[in-house]
Image: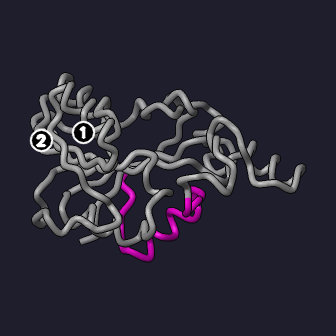
Amino acid sequence: MISHSHQIPTWVTNNTRVLDLGCGNGDLLAQLVNSHQIDALGLELDPEKIAKCLDQGISVIQQDLNSGLSNFNDQQFDTVIMTQTLQAIRRPDLVMSEMLRVGREAIVTFPNFAYIRNRMQLGLSGHMPVNPQLPNPWYDTPNIHLSTFHDFEELCRTLTIQILDRDTSNLSGKRTWLGKVWPNLFGEVAVYRLTKEA
């Protein structure tokens, strides 16, 4: 289980409108409501997770992110968050563009496939990695677009998206000094704060 990065709350401003794509049980939004008094809305597909959001008092809409965000207006939100969902979407490029259409800023996290443990598993065993970061076998995984820090930043350049901040964390959501120095090799989870270039 990957925890939310401790960095995310520092990138969210108090009393703003926040949309969380693939919000899961609503834990991150509930935390931000309590600490930042945000106006929160989540999107989630799983009915059980939606029920848990509602139990926490989080407004949530059942929606498949692969169908886009056309039900939202331009710049309707201050921040749009997507944690550990990018790699499970059919067209991450389209969803990222939509995030920055409906929001002024975006926060995105995803597992870094170039993390040293993954490289070693693939290189030494000749098999796709299976570990706490990527716990499912290749034939039964929700992850369909695995990427690295370098891949993601190249996509941002292609989409004319500006990287405001970049961080890395381990699976428990905490920073490591090796991940900060060599993020593409030692960063387990990539954490980005983005906006659209003017």
Is residue 55 visible in this depiction of the protein?
A: yes
153 is within the stretch colored magenta = yes
The residue sitting at 25% across, 63% down in the picture is 100
Secondary structure at badge 1 equals loop
Say left or right for 167 vs 150: left
Rendered image quadrant of residue 5: top left
Q: Which residue is mark 2?
A: 16
**Disc 2 to disc 1, C-alpha distance:** 8 Å
Give the percent coordinates (x, y) of residue 155: 47, 70
Determine the residue located farthest toward the bottom in the rendered image: 158
Give the percent coordinates (x, y) of residue 98: 27, 67
Q: Which residue is mark 1?
A: 12
Mark 1 and mark 2 in contact (Cβ < 8 Å)?
A: yes
Say left or right for 82 vs 142: left
Determine the residue located farthest toward the right in the rendered image: 124
146 is within the stretch colored magenta = yes
The stretch of residues the image draws in magenta is 144-164
Residue 97's disc number? none
Give the percent coordinates (x, y) of residue 154: 52, 69
Residue in the foreground of this view, choosing between 158 and 77: 77
Say left or right for 134 vs 87: right
The residue sitting at 27% across, 46% down in the picture is 20
Circle 1 residues within 10 Å: few <14, some 14–19, many ≥20: many
Q: Amino acid at mark 2?
A: Thr
Determine the residue located farthest toward the top in the rendered image: 34
The residue sitting at 14% across, 65% down in the picture is 71
Residue in the foreground of this view, choosing between 34 and 25: 25
Is residue 181 visible in this depiction of the protein?
A: no
